[in-house]
Image: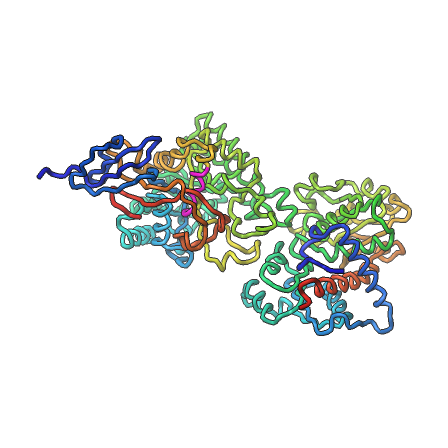
Amino acid sequence: MAKKKFDLIIRRAFLKGREVDVYVSKGVIAEIRDTQTEFDPEGAEVQDAFGLTMMPSMIDVHTHLREPGFEYKEDVESGLRAAAWGGFGAILCMANTNPVNDTAATTELMLEKARRHWPDGPRLVPIGALTKELKGEELAPMAELVRAGCGAFSNDGLPVKNTDLFRKAMEYASDWGKPVIDHCEDPFMAVGCGVNEGEVSDRLGLQGQPDMAEALQVSRDVLLAEYLDMHIHLAHISCRKSLDVIRQAKARGIRVTAETCPHYLILTEDYLEDPATQYSTLAKVNPPLRPEADRLAMIEALEDGTIDFLATDHAPHAAHEKEVEFDIAPCGISGLDTAFATTWGLVRDGVISEETFNRAWVTGPAETFELPCNRFEIGDPADFFLFDPEEEWEVCAATMQSKGKNTPLAGSVLKGRVKTHFLHGKKIV
Amino acid sequence: MKWLHKDLLDVSQLSRSEAMSLFDTAAHFQEINTRPVKKVPTLKGRSVVLFFAEPSTRTKTSFDVAAKRLSADSFSLAKSSSSLTKGETLKDTVLTLQAMAPDCIVMRHWCSGAAKFIADRLDCAVINAGDGRHAHPTQALLDGFTMFQEWGDLAGKTILILGDIKHSRVARSNVILLNKLGATVRMCAPRTLLPSTVRSWPVEVYSDLNEAVKGVNGIMCLRLQLERQKDGLLPDLREYACTYGLGPKHVELADKDVRIMHPGPMNRGVEINSELADCDRSLVLDQVANGVAMRMALLFLYMTRKGAEE
Ligand SMILES: [Zn+2]
């Protein structure tokens, strides 16, 4: 009997506009053929994917997993499960845990939890703190953090106020070749939180955060990156003013990359004023949802490459924490479960192209953070999922894998659902 | 008359004709307040909870008097005496209140949207007695009622709102109501105390008080929170008083029958000259008296509304 050539064959999947059979051997893509009528599995495991579309596993470079410290909101296991079901094969998790991820011990704990719960699950890449305890006072031990497995550095929710220290942090991090991610928020301008400063915040009587607060810090970062000739990655960009600065910076050859999140592409501040959802803390997010003109500008910027890719800023919170007065509710939207369906919806509606979608969730983050990804070329890792583009599902506690059910999409019906997910040719969902 | 609204969260919920019928009802109750025995059995056996998470003697007393004059039982839940200080969430407080089966909850809270939050979770009527910077509908209604009694139709009248508009729920609710009633609204304050998008509001905006007062029929002064200076919004109180404090020379520039209002409590000598507060053009005490009548009207309509009668 001949030695089996393939471990796994996905039959009749729809990939980039054609129906194909995908052959996997030893965890990598071995062959992609147009579907044949004559078919001999030669002993390989066969999965029939008729009616399903194949997509490379997505990468989310901005999630909050909450472990250690806030496991009631999310833990490594539930976060990875949400990622896998959401179509993500790799996620980077932020350092604002308790303790903060500013020592090898914390990084190792996260990685050990991931390995123990799910050795074949989505790849977890912790992001180390840029400063100790995220206090913005002393540099974190970045060499130690890289050796422990951190893939980037960020003070995410607590941007470094001291520009000189931030410069030193960028310089120090550059020695270890890992990107610095900045949450752009001028610390003095951004006193309000969770709602854009504008007509909606004025009518609702909420202290708003001006888009200027973001754009000012974007400008600072761009100037620093140019001065130091270093790369900087800007997290969850939300407004047109920032895009103008980034666009100019890129034109001048400054090494800046930027992400935005699905919620800035599909929602606006109007959600907070709609009679049905007025003052809903589910839409309290930092940076805040902006007006429609900004939403349209974000879509355009994603399409033209000013925005390099997407990230969820997955920020799970417990129900009781969100069911409070707007002023005291924490910011954040649980995003891993819904990111694929919402952004694929933009492709389906012709708002963004499929190529943009692929750059947004696969090649863009992979290039910036030097992660392997599947471009469906021979030898690429067999990381892909199959989804039913027609399946409709209602976003609710029961359909979400994350512990965090906090999403303004709760109750809405999305179209397109992940049915099965393979990493290195092994089925994880 | 049948009242269909369950809650009063802001005046934006009310139509012009509903506001006018509230004025009619308040005028009816005003008469009761002039009788030797100021009490009617209208709401006997009904209960009102006064839930004030932010201290307010005036509004709370006004509602308490209004409830008692209608023979309703009123209960207070002040911030100090409630579990709020022990870290209980607003949701738990609401569920506790619900279990006590009140007919109406009057709430004052320091968070914008808090009234909506509890109204969504309670079966009984909720009357917003001020939520954060958002809305103060009963104040706007009593102000509107006071002006209506003074002038009748408000169409053609120009009202100046003067002072810290940015942080004022009174100003927000008054702008909405006065527009509904056909009045022209002006605003005057330093730019730091105006909402960022005030230019898109249906008002005329002034920075010079001498210009702002020209020909106006009514001037509504707002209370200045003295800590605004520490927030960096003002250089100092003296400059504010000299520039935006209402004084006799301003009144000279206004309509000869101009009326002066203030929701209280006043900082005499800061936002308003002390003699002006007490002069015969001042409606400050009428506002207080009308506040009781308006709140009687509101308690009556919301507690006997359709669906609350079973
Ligand atoms: Zn952030």
In the current view of this chain or complex, which residue is farthest to the right? B256
Picture layout, residue A72 above or below residue A363? below
Picture layout, residue A426 above or below residue B114? above
Residue B137 x/y as whole percent = 71, 55
**Quadrant of the rendering where the N terminus of chain A is positioned:** top left
The reply, left or right, for residue A289 in relation to residue B186 is: left
The reply, left or right, for residue A198 in relation to residue B182 is: left
In the current view of this chain or complex, which residue is farthest to the left? A1
Verify whether residue B166 appears in magenta: no
Q: What is the magenta range?
A: A336-345
Residue B97 x/y as whole percent = 60, 68
Residue A177 visible: no
In the current view of this chain or complex, which residue is farthest to the top? A252
Residue B262 x/y as whole percent = 79, 55
Verify whether residue A337 appears in magenta: yes
Choose between B128 and B270: the one closer to the eye: B128
The reply, left or right, for residue B283 in relation to residue A424 is: right
The reply, left or right, for residue A294 in relation to residue A111 is: right
Residue A399 x/y as whole percent = 41, 52
